[in-house]
Amino acid sequence: MAKSLTIRKGDRVRVISGKDKGKEGKVLRAYPEKERVVVENVHMMKKHTRPSQKNRQGGIIEMEGTIHVSNVMLICPSCGEATRVGRRRDAGVRVRTCKKCGKDIA
Ligand SMILES: [Zn+2]
């Protein structure tokens, strides 16, 4: 069974450890089975590319690498704080809640 993450694509998160500690960004991709996420402008990695039709010169491009979900905290859209995520069930549907302000997180 696939694991589910408390962090999802489109969330805003704050990085809490590593070289990008303190940075905030939007989650671009989430990989629940690996418990990793890709966050906008976080963990930029240089990638060498060969010349192609799109990019005739080739060369080095920078792109985001994946980071483990334990390195980020969700930023609550209601109170704006980086928070741990609680869960509750509402009519069988899992709802995420903010541990700081108690509001539901969409
Ligand atoms: Zn909150």
Image: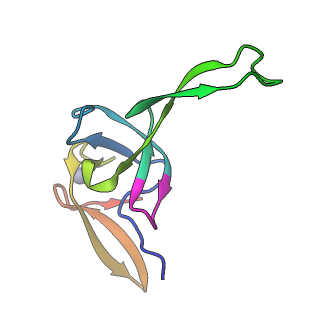
Residues in magenta, as a range:
30-36
Figure quadrant of residue 79: top left
Please give the name of the residue rendered at 48% of the width and 83% of the height, measured from the top-left corner: 1
Compared with 59, 82 (above or below) is: below
Q: Residue reaching furthest right?
A: 53
Outermost residue on the top side: it is 57
Relative horizontal placement of residue 104, taking residue 4 as reference (left or right): left
- Asked where in the image residue 58 lies, by quadrant, the reply is top right
Give the quarter of the image for residue 70.
Answer: bottom left
Q: Is residue 79 magenta?
A: no
Q: How is the image coloured?
A: rainbow
Where in the figure is residue 2, as x and y percent of width and height?
A: 48, 76
Is residue 77 positioned above or below 47 on the image? below
Tally the marks.
0
Q: Residue at x 23, y 38 (%)?
A: 18
Where residue 52 sits: x, y (%)? 78, 25
- Across and down, in percent, residue 48 comes to 58, 26
Reply above or below: 66 against 85: above
Extreme residue toward the bottom, this view: 92
Query: Residue, x 42% and y 74% (percent of image)?
Result: 3
Residue 34 located within the stretch drawn in magenta: yes
Q: Residue at x 44, y 56 (%)?
A: 8
- Depth order, front residue of 40/90: 40
Quadrant in which the C terminus is drawn: bottom left
Give 102 or 11, whichever is nearer the viewer.
Answer: 11
